[in-house]
Amino acid sequence: MQTHDFFLILLAILLTARIFAELAAKLKAPSVIGELLAGVVLGPSLLGWIEPIDAIKLMAEIGIILLLFEVGLETDPKQLARAGLKSIVVALAGFGLPLLLGFGAGYWIFDLSLLVSLYIGGTLTATSIGITARVLTDLKRHHAPEGQVILGAAILDDVMGVILLALLYEFSIGGGVTLGNTGKVTMFVAAFFILAPVAAKLMSIIIKRFNATTEIPGLIPTTIVSLVLFFAWLAHSMGAPELLGGFAAGLALSRRFFLPFGAALHADPSFAEHIETEMKPIIHLFTPIFFVMVGLSLNLREIDWSSSFIWIFSITLMIAAIVGKLVGPWLIRESWPARWIIGVAMIPRGEVGLIFAELGRVSGILNNEIYAGMIIVIAFTTVLSPFVMKELYSRFNHRLQAAEGL
């Protein structure tokens, strides 16, 4: 491809992603849905103008790593302590039930292989903390009791989901599901999450000192992106997906991070916030490319829509995805409106679900038909949840506020 042609392709991706994201936001839908639709429109499913070429795939890889860096950066482990046991119960149920239901549907109902069924179940475990947090903030309920439970559970879901993703990645490249592969990844993840924060903290001290003396702008984004890419390379070299390195780097640099086992590693909150401010423009430049890439990789024309499989498959997984998240809140002591709100808030799969599905496709585990079914489920749950949450709050907000006043 000629350089000027690539520039035109990149221009089309960035502008179309932005236009569709703005339209989605106007319709009160998550912007990620607009970016996904931009890829569907530009790709082989509709116009066929752009193919998922290697250069775009590489930029999408950087986007997914930076996206997980942002997820790690915004992760607040102390939120779990504030929400307590309720968040843990909701998170464990919301992680375990969709995994079992998705795996069971794939393995026993649709007669798919063990690894494909695990990827399906793994994709259904995701909760998009970004979408959920945005809705709660818009409604000014992020500090409310049920809001604390939701955010704490979503954070724990993210952490467990990334670990599960590392396991599935190892299974896909390491010759299948074995006890040895499971032990290897578990040991790696434990070591990585203990050592990575220490290394990141030491590097952040150096970066902070140089930033105070340098006369050249751009030190923080240059050094932080370098750190994220180094962690991604390190993760890959140790047999885990690169995006785990991005997540660990974000978690380590978070202003809220603490080391396990009671050994606190206190970060400078103002400096950590400065890192977030400097990094967000870069993250928001690359992450839409990833979501557009998901749409470009999906060829809806190759799917036999007259076949009953795609509809039965999608509807079955839709039910599993929704029911699996709604059960958890009924295991805790809350008012029934709060239980419904908590359950619905855990439903959107969003960007985290797309990461699972895309890794399954790239690894050759999910074929086009199953991949399309997963994208339909992710898109539906992502769009559905914010509207239902807003409706529930409009009906029951007075009851929730009255219960808080007791």
Image (tube, rainbow, N blue to C red):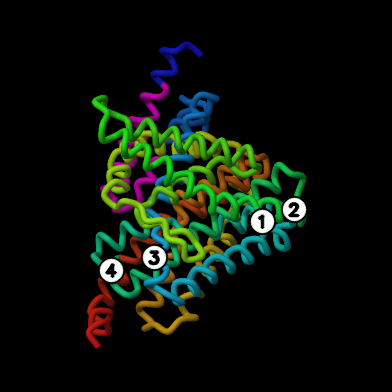
Per the model, the C-alpha gap separating discs 4 and 1 is 35 Å
- Over which residues does the magenta segment extend? 9-36
Q: Are marks 2 and 1 in contact (CB under 8 Å)?
A: yes
Instruction: Say which label, 4 or 3, has the lower sequence index.
Output: 3
Under circle 3, the secondary element is helix
Question: Which residue is denoted by mark 1 in the rendering?
Answer: 118
Residue 64's place in the image compared with 392, above or below, is above
Question: Which residue is denoted by mark 4 in the rendering?
Answer: 143
- Amino acid type at mark 1: Leu
* Quadrant where the image shows the C terminus: bottom left
Residue 40 makes an appearance in the image:
no
Q: Are marks 3 and 2 in contact (CB under 8 Å)?
A: no
Question: Which residue is denoted by mark 2 in the rendering?
Answer: 177
Looking at this rendering, what residue extends furthest in the bottom direction? Answer: 406
Q: Is residue 218 magenta?
A: no
Under circle 1, the secondary element is helix
- Amino acid type at mark 4: His
Per the model, the C-alpha gap separating discs 2 and 1 is 10 Å
Q: Is residue 24 magenta?
A: yes
Badge 3 crowding class, 10 Å Cα cut-off, few under 14, some 14 to 19, many 20 or more, is few
Which numbered disc, 3 or 2, marks the residue closer to the eye? 3
Residue drawn at (37%, 53%) of the image: 74
Report the predominant secondary structure element of the magenta stretch: helix
Question: Which residue is denoted by mark 3 in the rendering?
Answer: 78
* Front-most of residues 189 and 299: 189
